[in-house]
């Protein structure tokens, strides 16, 4: 006889029910993963196995609790006409020890398993590809330290290029900063994301990689993964979504980027050196360069602004003022309101977004640290955004070409650097050079 006073028949029934619960837990745990997306990283099987273990245990507990609920509702329901109270129970020490001890063991085992997986995932790997990641309402920006050897191998003589000062400062450590709105990686190279937020808490999540990490203002958080399943770099339909999983404002649900997993290092390097050539040899016409910068979405402007001429490049944000005829406004109503010339007003709006707020819009735009040359190119392009199509301001294109371009790339027709040296940059440009995501 035991302290619960169970008969041998009751013990047998409890054993049968226990086996059924365990079988049911396994069925739930084994069937549910068929709903998951592909496993595209080395970490995905670890996470899925851990989650499956939790599902099996959770499934058995779910069946136990729901089964007892249904059983009790039928078995112990009040008889017709019975309005008496239920019997008074003062508890059962043996039962309470059992139902405390079993969950304690389960939680301890799951803690050990989770800790183990967490440690494996967070352990530094050899030769990690570091991706500097910036989250801001409502977009993701990725930046790479691209080794100069990639373009030197294509015949570019870096030392003799006539580069703007912010680019010179950037390459002093032997790497050029390459910015991208897509996350580029390649199969089987470990990745480390160093992530910062410009404003509020965001969270980085790539479902196919099974990695998720908060991005917190004022600190750098990291997450590591090794992509294993390449997609097609030329087909955006195949790219893996990066999502924000922390409610960060009105456009939180639209805060999506895409991950390109190149099949090998050669494909990744080809993409990177093409981007490097674009930075080292930008077009000498500032309007053309401004269009290139804005249509590449290298800066997150498109997530908050509309510009009809850039509509095909996702310029459909509705958080900031519409830029479709901003050139007219810059030299018209804004010039009257601010007392600045069109060029100065647009430049100020980029570097000090809060200095003058367009009526009806809040102070939401961050200073993106856009370099002097990129700012001049963007302003030159915005000046062409007029109802008539005629530029609203006068831009010294020769001075821009001399100060902001290094000539044509090797092998291009008429390849020779401009004769004049780059002019002194403003203190502001120097201050932002380090922080420039790409210039
Ligand atoms: Cu960023 Cu939600």
Image (cartoon, helix red, strand yellow):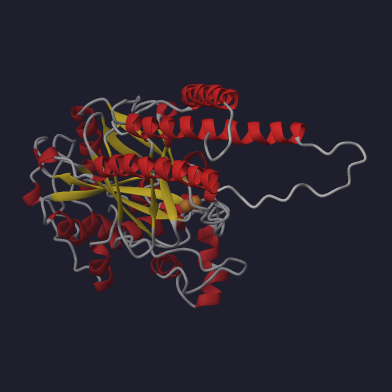
Q: Nearer the viewer, residue 58 or 371?
A: 58
The vertical placement of 333 against 182, above or below, is below
User: In the displayed structure, does residue 408 sit left or right of residue 63?
Assistant: left
Q: Position of residue 322 (x, y in %)?
A: 56, 56
Q: Nearer the viewer, residue 335 or 238?
A: 238
Relative image position of residue 410 (x, y in whole percent)? 13, 38
Query: Is residue 41 rendered to the left or right of residue 242?
Result: left
Identity of the residue furthest to the right in this view: 81
Residue located 51% across and 43% down the image:
99
Q: Position of residue 403 (x, y in %)?
A: 22, 59
Does 264 sit left or right of 245 as displayed? Answer: left
Image height of 23 relative to 279, above or below: above
Q: Which percent across, then down, holds residue 265?
A: 19, 30
Q: Nearer the viewer, residue 253 or 52?
A: 52
Q: Residue furthest bottom?
A: 339
At horizontal 22% and vertical 52% (from top left) the residue drawn is 405
Q: Is residue 294 visible?
A: no
Q: Quadrant of residue 219?
A: bottom left
Asked if 149 appears above or below 37 in the picture, the reply is below
Q: Nearer the viewer, residue 134 or 247?
A: 247
Can residue 269 be seen in this snapshot? Answer: yes
Residue furthest out toward the front: 1
Name the quadrant containing residue 10. top right
Q: Residue at x 35, y 65 (%)?
A: 218
Left or right side of 164 for 328: right
Total tally of numbered discs in the picture: 0
């Amino acid at each position: 006889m035991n302290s619960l006073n169970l008969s041998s028949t009751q013990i047998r029934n409890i054993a049968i029910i226990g086996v059924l619960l365990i079988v049911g837990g396994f069925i739930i745990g084994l069937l549910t993963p068929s709903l998951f997306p592909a496993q595209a990283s080395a970490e995905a099987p670890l996470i899925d196995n851990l989650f499956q273990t939790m599902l099996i245990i959770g499934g058995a507990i779910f069946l136990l609790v729901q089964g007892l609920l249904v059983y009790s509702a039928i078995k112990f329901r009040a008889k017709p006409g019975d309005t008496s109270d239920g019997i008074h129970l003062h508890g059962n020490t043996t039962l309470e020890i059992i139902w405390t001890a079993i969950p304690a063991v389960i939680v301890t085992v799951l803690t050990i398993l989770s800790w183990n997986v967490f440690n494996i995932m967070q352990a530094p790997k050899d030769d990690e590809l570091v991706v500097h990641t910036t989250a801001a309402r409502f977009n993701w920006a990725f930046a790479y330290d691209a080794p100069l050897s990639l373009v030197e191998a294509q015949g570019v003589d870096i030392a003799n290029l006539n580069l703007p000062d912010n680019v010179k400062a950037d390459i002093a450590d032997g790497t050029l900063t390459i910015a991208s709105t897509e996350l580029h990686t390649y199969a089987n190279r470990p990745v480390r994301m160093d992530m910062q937020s410009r404003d509020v808490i965001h969270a980085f999540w790539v479902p196919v990689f099974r990695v998720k990490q908060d991005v917190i203002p004022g600190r750098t958080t990291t997450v590591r993964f090794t992509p294993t399943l390449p997609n097609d770099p030329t087909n955006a339909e195949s790219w893996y979504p990066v999502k924000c999983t922390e409610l960060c404002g009105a456009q939180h649900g639209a805060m999506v980027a895409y991950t390109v997993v190149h099949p090998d290092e050669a494909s990744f390097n080809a993409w990177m050196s093409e981007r490097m050539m674009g930075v080292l040899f930008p077009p000498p016409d500032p309007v053309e360069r401004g269009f290139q910068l804005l249509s590449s979405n290298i800066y997150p402007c498109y997530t908050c602004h509309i510009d009809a001429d850039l509509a095909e490049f996702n310029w459909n944000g509705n958080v900031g003022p519409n830029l479709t005829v901003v050139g007219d406004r810059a030299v018209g109503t804004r010039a009257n309101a601010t007392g600045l010339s069109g060029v100065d007003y647009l430049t100020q709006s980029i570097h000090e977004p809060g200095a003058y707020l367009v009526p009806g819009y809040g102070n939401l735009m961050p200073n993106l640290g856009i370099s002097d040359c990129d700012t001049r190119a963007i302003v030159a392009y915005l000046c062409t955004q007029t109802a008539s199509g005629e530029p609203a301001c006068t831009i010294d294109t020769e001075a821009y070409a001399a100060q902001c371009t290094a000539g044509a790339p090797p092998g291009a027709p008429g390849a020779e650097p401009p004769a004049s040296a780059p002019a002194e940059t403003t203190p502001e440009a120097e201050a932002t050079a380090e922080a420039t995501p790409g210039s």
